[in-house]
């Protein structure tokens, strides 16, 4: 047990993220003994809640984790609510007074972690008030966790970063990308750097192409207002997809530390080609979901979703090809695809290896004459909803002759393991308490990701042509298939039979 002493101040304490993710994660840390007695949480937002109301809400948010009544009461007793408009300077004085009292009451040694779980428009105001009103005068550490989106383009991100770095040092800033907290995303480094068979093959000498798919079956649900201003490119590609890509593409770090890993990720992102408008048109496809049906259920079109402009031209789907201009990856396309209302939820990476130089079996006696090409070897990393890896190989079909058959070596984590896997937010909160920035994005990563994505956005914004549509619960428009076909490849992603057979398809 390694008890942390800390005061959390959660801005946006009444919001969706706080209630769905942050409070349950704090409770799991409490249960595991990372938080014991010396911690306190101030939740703040405008709603005029009392401490009692707040504590009852906290207990509701952790109910699904089945705490005993005593456990829930003891945990909730560490929570305090402060009604506060973040634009109002006076409130920071009240906040400071409460923070100082709690510091003493719980023996927190002046350690303060500020979680900005609200609209990014307020981040600048909050951090400047934290400094000017003395919230950072305590003797311990001061760290800030910042939610996505970090800006809406390079310009706004840079401005936001400027505001934050006037108050916090880079190593005190924890920019969340919850994909970096996922078990199998963290496993990318294990696969690469703990297995000589893979690391020795990890380059353009043996790899044909890499595919990253983040498929979601859900539509925009109740987030239409936000999403219609954002679209899939900014919502998923700028952050989650480019982060996964950087972990796949980076050079081996000299040590597994936040400094070394982030330095390698930055270099990888800097090698991703920033396209010209012509290259964007050739290498990126966007689309929007129209109506569709699957297994007897009908789905409405994006334009009919709540809080979405009926004439919206926001993309709910992106497919594209990234090119990395360095020695390791020259000539290896990184194909990415993400969208809402796709066939099923399935985040997967496929590493497609090159074919053997000659298929010696193609004319073998008894072999199939049509079998001119063998199936490629593919390493698949299943990120969610199932977690695991598979490696597809070619083997001989049992019996006469010499027909080749694809064989799959497969490992999936059991349902029990998945159930007990710490949730991304839990891991990331613990990392930030430990002062470990490995799984957070450095400013230079954010900046480079915006440079890459901004030209795509600008090219699309200047393109008056009609957005392609795809049927809800399909895998996107035909243009996304053509993107690979013209390079002589195809998407490896297919509905997950393992998942389907166990009736786990949502
Ligand atoms: P919500 O709209 O649910 O919450 C916003 C919070 O901000 C509320 O607590 C609201 O409380 C508070 N608030 C708004 N204006 C003020 C103000 N002037 N002064 C003080 N408090 C204010 O948003 P989410 O929780 O969904 O999102 C929060 C952040 O997390 C955003 O940056 C979002 O992009 C990000 N995020 C959210 C995810 C999610 O799953 N929800 C996933 C990934 C990122 P009140 O009205 O009481 O003031
Ligand atoms: C969020 C996006 O960052 O990631 C959402 O804003 C998306 O639109 C979500 O649904 C996907 O996260 P996960 O963990 O479900 O893959």
Image (spheres, rainbow, N blue to C red):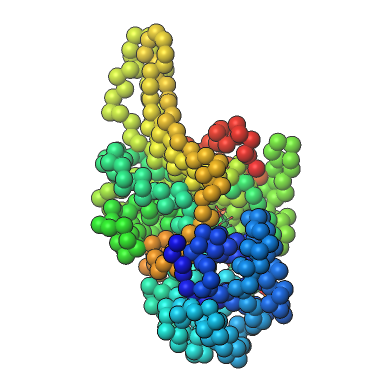
Residue 476 placement, left or right of 166: right
Q: Mark yes or no: residue 244 visible.
A: yes
The relative height of residue 59 versus residue 353 in the rendered view (above or below) is: below
Q: Mark yes or no: residue 484 visible.
A: no
- Residue placed most toward the observer, 297 or 185: 185
For the C terminus, give its image quadrant: top right
Q: Quadrant of residue 274?
A: bottom left
The relative height of residue 252 versus residue 35 in the rendered view (above or below) is: above
Q: Residue furthest front?
A: 70
Rendered location of residue 321, percent (x, y): 43, 49
For the N terminus, give its image quadrant: bottom left
Rendered location of residue 355, percent (x, y): 33, 31
Rendered location of residue 234, percent (x, y): 52, 61
- Residue placed most toward the observer, 189 or 322: 189
Q: Which residue lies at the image location 25% right of the left edge and 50% below the top edge?
A: 327
The relative height of residue 439 versus residue 173 in the rendered view (above or below) is: above
């Amino acid at each position: 047990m390694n008890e942390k002493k800390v005061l959390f101040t959660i801005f946006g304490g009444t919001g969706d993220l706080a209630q769905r993710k942050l409070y349950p994660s704090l409770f799991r840390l409490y249960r595991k003994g990372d938080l014991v007695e010396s911690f306190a949480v101030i939740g703040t937002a405008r709603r005029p809640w009392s401490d009692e109301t707040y504590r009852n809400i906290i207990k509701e948010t952790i109910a699904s984790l089945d705490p005993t009544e005593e456990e829930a009461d003891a945990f909730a007793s560490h929570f305090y609510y402060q009604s506060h408009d973040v634009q109002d300077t006076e409130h920071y004085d009240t906040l400071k007074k409460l923070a100082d009292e709690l510091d003493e009451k719980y023996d927190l040694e002046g350690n303060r972690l500020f979680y900005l779980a609200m609209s990014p428009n307020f981040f600048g105001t909050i951090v400047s008030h934290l400094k000017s009103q003395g919230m950072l005068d305590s003797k311990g550490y001061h760290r800030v966790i910042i939610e996505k989106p970090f800006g809406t383009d390079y310009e706004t991100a840079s401005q936001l970063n400027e505001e934050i770095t006037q108050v916090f040092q880079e190593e005190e800033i924890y920019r969340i990308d919850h994909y970096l907290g996922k078990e199998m995303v963290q496993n990318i480094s294990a696969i690469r750097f703990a297995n000589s068979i893979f690391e020795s093959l990890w380059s353009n000498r043996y790899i044909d192409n890499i595919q990253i798919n983040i498929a979601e079956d859900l539509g925009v649900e109740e987030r239409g207002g936000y999403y219609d201003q954002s679209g899939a490119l900014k919502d998923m590609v700028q952050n989650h997809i480019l982060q996964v890509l950087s972990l796949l593409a980076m050079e081996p770090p000299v040590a597994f530390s936040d400094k070394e890993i982030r330095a390698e990720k930055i270099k990888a992102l800097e090698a991703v080609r920033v396209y010209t408008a012509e290259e964007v048109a050739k290498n990126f496809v966007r689309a929007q979901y129209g109506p569709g049906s699957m297994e007897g259920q009908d789905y409405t079109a994006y334009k009919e979703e709540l809080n979405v402009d009926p004439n919206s031209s926001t993309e709910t789907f992106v497919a594209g090809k990234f090119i990395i201009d360095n020695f390791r990856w020259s000539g290896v396309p990184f194909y990415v695809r993400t969208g809402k209302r796709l066939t099923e939820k399935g985040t997967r990476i496929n590493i497609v290896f090159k074919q053997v130089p000659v298929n010696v079996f193609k004319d073998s006696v008894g072999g199939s004459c049509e079998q001119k090409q063998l199936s490629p070897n593919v390493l698949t990393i299943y990120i969610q909803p199932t977690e695991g890896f598979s490696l597809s190989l070619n083997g001989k079909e049992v019996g006469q002759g010499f027909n080749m058959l694809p064989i799959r070596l497969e490992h999936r984590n059991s349902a029990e393991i998945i159930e007990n896997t710490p949730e991304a937010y839990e891991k990331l909160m613990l990392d930030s308490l430990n002062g470990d920035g490995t799984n957070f994005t450095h400013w230079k990563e954010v900046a480079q990701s915006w440079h890459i994505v901004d030209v795509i956005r600008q090219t699309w914004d200047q393109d008056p042509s009609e957005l392609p549509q795809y049927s809800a619960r399909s895998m996107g428009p035909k243009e996304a298939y053509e993107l690979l076909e013209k390079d002589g490849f195809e998407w490896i992603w297919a509905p997950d039979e393992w998942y389907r057979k166990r009736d786990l398809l949502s």
